[in-house]
Image (cartoon, rainbow, N blue to C red):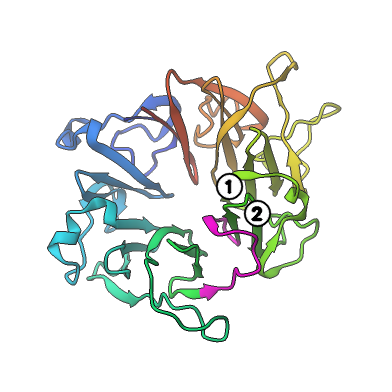
């Protein structure tokens, strides 16, 4: 597995000396980090000041740590975590934000939170997998393990194997019984939440002040509310960050909505250049450098803080939005922003996308 990276390296999180990585380059640590085998590395999460890496079942923070930059530090496992579990990398989830690292044991269904500023041992949080009694008849616990966690500075969501959703660092049950189908994925923006069901339905809730909920207004939503504009479309993937959201349909189309101050939605206006925000999902059209429409299916999507990336069926990667740190794959001096999707990279072979706040990563097999 090879990672092509572009964007911010201000804190040395990509284990090299360049501050800005413009133009996709292979993740290749400097000599002092060569004890990490490149082919066995996995990028778990990309944050503003550090990345979470996994190598042979051991998790590392690369970047800012303990008030210093250019660090590569092994994440200390909780003392209460059994040794046998610690070696089973697929049974551990590690995510984080600027203030905390969250470690989840699937086997124990337990959560530990590590305060980055204190550098003390993990604090354990008991995860209650039972739904509130007022919503259901109490039943025997089944295989209801945490399967995914999404954390931003202001938001946190957990998804279990049975499709239950919990919100907050101290998990609080989110009622999704009105949702059509079992919840299959969750995403967080800075102030909004998105979920996808196995019937292809999209629901959003949270703060709507920047149109990020997709309901046609700036109203807030306290509970997951179906995005009506997508009611007749089967969605297979969602991505959210900042104050915008992308949704990929089974037909290979992408719908975008939310804040568009730097062109992160990638919607091109044929008449004039503008960065209008969109309050409802809007179908994305692609155009080449000559203005000719590109008729190809899209197979992957990913959102950064103020940029977006898509992968087409021909394995070309297209990016749009803020390019302050070269995260679009273009020289930041020439393209400080890109207002609509522009071809940035050609992959050869199967690949997928992963964006951080100010990075775009192409994962190639």
Quick one: which residue is furthest to the top in this view?
Answer: 290
Using residue 266 as the reference point, say whether residue 144 is left or right of it: left
Mark 1 surroundings within 10 Å by alpha-carbon count, few (fewer than 14), some (14 through 19), many (20 or more):
many
Q: Residue at point 64% right, 49% down?
A: 244
Q: Nearer the viewer, residue 67 or 125?
A: 125
User: Residue 221, relative to residue 282: is it above or below?
Assistant: below
> Dot 2: what SS?
strand
* Residue 112 spot, x, y in % from top left: 30, 69
Q: Are marks 1 and 2 in contact (CB under 8 Å)?
A: yes
Which residue is located at x 29 percent, y 75 percent?
Answer: 124
Q: Nearer the viewer, residue 112 or 259?
A: 112
State yes or no: residue 180 in magenta.
Answer: yes
Q: Which residues are magenta?
A: 173-192
Query: Which quadrant of the structure image shows residue 174?
Result: bottom right
Which residue in the protein does label 1 denote?
A: 238
Sooner in the amino-acid sequence: mark 1 or mark 2: 2
In the picture, the quarter occupied by the C terminus is top left
Quadrant in which the N terminus appears: top left
Q: Position of residue 228 (x, y in %)?
A: 77, 55
Image-based side of 191 in relation to 73, left or right: right
Q: In this rendering, does residue 257 appear at all?
A: yes
Q: Mark 2: few, some, or many residues within 10 Å (few <14, many ≥20)? A: many
Mark 2, residue position = 202
Magenta-colored stretch includes residue 20: no
- Residue 207 in the image, given as x and y percentages of width and height: 67, 65
């Amino acid at each position: 597995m090879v990672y092509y990276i572009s964007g911010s390296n201000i804190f040395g999180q990509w284990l090299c000396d360049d501050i800005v990585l413009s133009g996709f380059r292979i993740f290749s640590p400097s000599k002092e980090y060569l004890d990490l085998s490149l082919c066995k590395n996995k990028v778990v999460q990309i944050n503003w000041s550090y990345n979470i890496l996994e190598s042979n079942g051991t998790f590392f923070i690369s970047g800012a740590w303990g008030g210093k930059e250019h660090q590569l530090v092994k994440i200390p496992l909780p003392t209460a975590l059994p040794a046998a579990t610690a070696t089973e990398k697929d049974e551990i989830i590690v995510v984080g934000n600027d203030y905390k690292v969250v470690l989840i044991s699937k086997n124990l269904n337990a959560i530990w939170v590590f305060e980055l500023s204190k550098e003390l041992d993990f604090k354990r949080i008991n995860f209650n997998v039972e739904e509130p009694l007022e919503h259901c008849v109490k039943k025997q616990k089944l295989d209801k393990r945490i399967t995914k966690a999404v954390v931003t500075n202001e938001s946190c969501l957990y998804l279990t194997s049975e499709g239950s959703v919990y919100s907050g660092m101290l998990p609080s049950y989110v009622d999704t019984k009105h949702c059509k189908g079992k919840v299959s994925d969750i995403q967080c923006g800075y102030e909004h939440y998105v979920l996808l069901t196995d019937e292809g339905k999209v629901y959003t809730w949270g703060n709507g002040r920047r149109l990020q909920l997709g309901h046609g207004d700036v109203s807030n939503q306290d509970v997951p509310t179906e995005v009506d504009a997508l009611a007749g479309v089967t969605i297979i993937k969602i991505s959210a960050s900042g104050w915008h959201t992308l949704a990929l349909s089974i037909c290979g189309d992408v719908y975008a909505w939310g804040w568009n101050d730097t062109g992160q939605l990638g919607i091109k206006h044929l008449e004039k250049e503008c960065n209008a925000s969109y309050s409802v999902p809007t179908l994305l059209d692609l155009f080449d450098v000559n203005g000719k429409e590109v008729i190809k299916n899209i197979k992957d999507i990913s959102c950064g803080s103020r940029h977006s990336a898509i992968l087409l069926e021909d394995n070309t990667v297209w990016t749009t939005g803020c390019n302050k740190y070269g995260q679009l794959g273009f020289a930041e001096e020439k393209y400080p922003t890109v207002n609509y999707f522009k071809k940035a990279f050609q992959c050869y072979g199967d690949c997928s996308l992963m964006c951080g706040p100010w990075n775009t990563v192409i994962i190639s097999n």
